[in-house]
Image: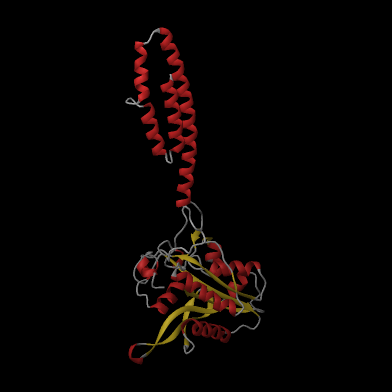
């Protein structure tokens, strides 16, 4: 019996002295394992008489209760301390500066679009937007595009399956029609957004592309106002020494219409011209269709391809590079 009292005292002291969970487990094995002194005492019970076995059994049970209670308490304390130490070692210093990572930036088309809008907003325009799935009324009819016009054919226009006369807009001009049917002049808006054509993708064409279109309607608007606006835009986007020229053209919703070229200096100092947009005076029929008196008001409109401007400014030769999400290409801008 005195041996068990001694083993109990030694075990409690060893448990209290254990500094880690591994040390505590070593105490458990040493005190209660198969080769422990306690195991030898348990084996000796077969040599005792019934009274002796009963007394020894009670002593062993008392030891197990005392040992287990002390072991569990110490185990809980050491486990909590180990967890605290782990958390402290893995704690993040949120005040420390992060590792240097390459800064993100908007896509090249987004950058160019924002620059273009900034130019026109600085001139007093406001930004107007509309749906990309558009009715034929706004995409064609109100813009003086007749029912038999080639642009309405499926080889040029993408129709939305399951809906009568609903298309993916072929230009952002429907936004201009929506503005004119809901607002009275004076009007000065720019309309950015994606547009869709049934084109095969190649170096200069894409079935999805972006435009910024502009519209001004007021009393006394002339072609000179259009030219002055486009000259200011060209100089802001391509350089203060740029000049523009207007060449006669045709669009169903403007009359007269003009293609606009911007000057540039090529290799060796050679002077040249690059086409950047289409424009013209708003056709009186369009004004009338939209509920504006063409005898009182005049206006001009223009449409600029964002991809075209981006390619000219940054010497991008293939429009598909703008949509391929190649990080090596995008990192240049």
Q: Nearer the viewer, residue 155 or 259?
A: 259
- Residue 59 x/y as whole percent: 45, 18
- Residue 62 x/y as whole percent: 48, 21
The N terminus: image quadrant: top left
- Residue 238 x/y as whole percent: 46, 83
Q: Residue at point 55% right, 76% down? A: 118
Number of disc labels: 0
In this picture, residue 181 sits left or right of residue 73: right
Taking the view exactly as shown, the residue that stands out farthest to the bottom is 269
Answer with the quarter of the image where residue 272 lies. bottom left
- Residue 102 x/y as whole percent: 42, 67
Q: Is residue 156 positioned above or below 35 on the image? A: below
Taking the view exactly as shown, the residue that stands out farthest to the top is 50
Colouring scheme, one of rainbow, by chain, secondary structure, one colour: secondary structure
Q: Nearer the viewer, residue 325 or 130?
A: 325
Q: Residue at point 55% right, 86% down? A: 228
Q: Residue at point 33% right, 91% down? A: 268
Q: Is residue 245 positioned above or below 88 on the image? A: below
Q: Is residue 332 positioned above or below 8 on the image? A: below
The C terminus: image quadrant: bottom left
């Amino acid at each position: 019996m005195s041996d068990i009292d001694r083993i109990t005292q030694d075990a409690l002291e060893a448990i209290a002295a254990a500094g880690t969970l591994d040390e505590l487990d070593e105490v458990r094995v040493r005190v209660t394992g198969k080769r422990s002194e306690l195991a030898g005492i348990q084996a000796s019970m077969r040599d005792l008489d019934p009274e002796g076995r009963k007394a020894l059994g009670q002593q062993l049970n008392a030891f197990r209760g005392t040992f287990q209670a002390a072991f569990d308490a110490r185990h809980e304390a050491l486990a909590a301390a180990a967890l605290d130490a782990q958390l402290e070692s893995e704690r993040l210093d949120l005040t420390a500066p992060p590792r240097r990572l390459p800064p993100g930036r908007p896509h090249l088309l987004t950058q160019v679009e924002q620059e273009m809008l900034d130019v026109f907003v600085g001139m007093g325009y406001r930004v107007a937007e509309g749906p990309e799935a558009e009715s034929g009324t706004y995409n064609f009819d109100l813009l003086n595009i007749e029912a038999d016009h080639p642009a309405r054919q499926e080889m040029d226009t993408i129709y939305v399956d399951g809906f009568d006369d609903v298309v993916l807009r072929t230009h952002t001009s429907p936004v201009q029609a929506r503005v004119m049917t809901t607002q009275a002049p004076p009007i000065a808006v720019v309309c950015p957004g994606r547009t869709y054509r049934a084109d095969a993708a190649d170096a200069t064409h894409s079935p999805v592309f972006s435009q910024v279109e502009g519209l001004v309607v007021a009393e006394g608007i002339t072609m000179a106002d259009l030219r002055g606006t486009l000259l200011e835009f060209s100089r802001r986007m391509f350089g203060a020494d740029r000049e523009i020229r207007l060449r006669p053209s045709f669009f169903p919703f403007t009359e007269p219409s003009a293609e606009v070229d911007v000057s540039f200096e090529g290799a060796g100092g050679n002077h040249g011209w690059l086409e950047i947009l289409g424009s013209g005076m708003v056709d009186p029929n369009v004004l009338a269709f939209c509920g504006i008196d063409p005898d009182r008001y005049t206006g001009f409109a223009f449409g600029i391809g964002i991809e075209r401007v981006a390619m000219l400014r940054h010497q991008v030769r293939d429009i598909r590079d703008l949509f391929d999400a190649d990080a090596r290409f995008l990192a240049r801008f």
